[in-house]
Image (cartoon, grey):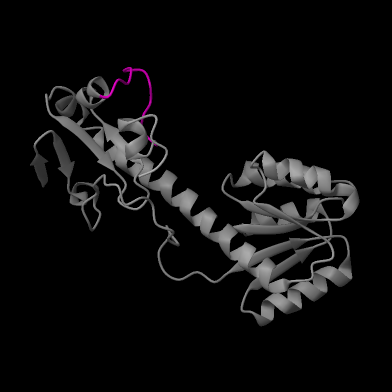
């Protein structure tokens, strides 16, 4: 169930119920579309805007492209729709009566912290959209009128991929922590360096005491979630 290489012990992913061994290498992360629930899921999009002509137009365009679309003309109705059937990606106007796009973003993230929101904004609200984007609360923003629907569709696809990746990472981390909790005492007593990393993202899932001692990490300092190369050499910024 495991291999020992000199100073490093690498566990086959069969311990975690996975298909391939997870190793730490220097190939760097690959862009992959993840679907943690399994199967093929159709693209879905919630459009929120108080301009009926825009929502009708966008709905028709994206449905012709094979995307399942629901629309709403205000934030409160959008929340009702989202609670009933959550979306990975929401395309929303920034300036709306009663509840603006920024407030809607916060409410949506309370329901699903992975949701990706793309803002459509007029000149008067572009500063708010830019601020939300820079604070990494929004995935992206585009200024109205949108002239390139291919570009918008590409942004929606990237947002959906980001949703899948972030949810995948959190799910795998929780599964790995649960699986390795029963081995933690054994690994921490070993003189060998023991670490486990995600084969796709190269993020550390587990490190034993010897690993942290050798590479200068305090016992209380979390290293899980760091890239392998970041934990080994803090000055290194890439593989």
User: Is 239 displayed left or right of 127 in the figure?
Assistant: left
Work out whether 65 lies above or below 19. Answer: below
Q: Which residues are magenta?
A: 215-225
Residue 231 position in % (x across, y down): 34, 31
Vertical relation: 11 (above or below) 49: above
Q: Is residue 222 magenta?
A: yes
Q: Give the number of marks.
A: 0
What residue appears at the point 58 percent right and 65 percent down from the top-left corner? 157
> Which residue is found at the position 61% from the left and 51% from the top?
115
Q: Nearer the viewer, residue 150 or 225?
A: 150
- Residue at (52%, 59%) from the top-left corner? 161
Q: Going by the image, does 181 lie left or right of 203?
A: left
Question: Horizontal and vertical percent for residue 141?
Answer: 73, 54
Which corner quadrant of the image does residue 208 belong to? top left
Q: Is residue 129 above or below residue 155?
A: above
Q: Position of residue 94 (x, y in %)?
A: 82, 51
Quadrant in the picture for residue 210: top left
The overriding secondary structure of the stretch rendered in magenta is: loop
Quadrant of the snapshot with the C terminus: top left
Q: Is residue 152 left or right of residue 189?
A: right
Res. 50 image quadrant: bottom right
Instruction: Report whether 173 appears left or right of 113.
Output: left
């Amino acid at each position: 169930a495991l291999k020992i290489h000199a100073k490093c012990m690498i566990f086959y992913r069969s311990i975690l119920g996975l298909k391939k061994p997870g190793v730490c290498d220097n190939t760097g992360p690959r862009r992959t579309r993840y679907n943690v629930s399994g199967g093929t899921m159709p693209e879905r999009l919630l459009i929120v805007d108080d301009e009926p002509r825009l929502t009708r137009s966008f709905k028709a365009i994206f449905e012709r492209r094979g995307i399942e679309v629901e629309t709403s003309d205000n934030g409160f109705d959008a929340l009702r729709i989202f609670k009933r059937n959550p979306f990975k990606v929401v395309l929303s106007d920034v300036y709306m009566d009663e509840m603006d796009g920024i407030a809607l973003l916060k409410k949506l993230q309370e329901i699903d912290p992975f949701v990706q929101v793309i803002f459509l904004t007029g000149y008067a609200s572009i500063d708010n959209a830019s601020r939300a984007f820079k604070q990494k609360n929004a995935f992206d923003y585009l200024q109205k009128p949108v002239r390139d629907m291919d570009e918008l569709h590409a942004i929606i696809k990237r947002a959906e991929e980001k949703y899948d990746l972030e949810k995948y990472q959190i799910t795998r981390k929780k599964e790995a922590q649960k699986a390795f909790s029963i081995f933690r005492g054994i690994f921490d007593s070993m003189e060998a360096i023991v670490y486990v990393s995600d084969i796709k993202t190269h993020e550390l899932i587990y490190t034993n005491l010897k690993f942290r001692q050798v590479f200068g990490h305090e016992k209380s300092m979390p290293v899980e979630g760091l890239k392998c190369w970041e934990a080994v050499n803090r000055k290194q910024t890439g593989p």
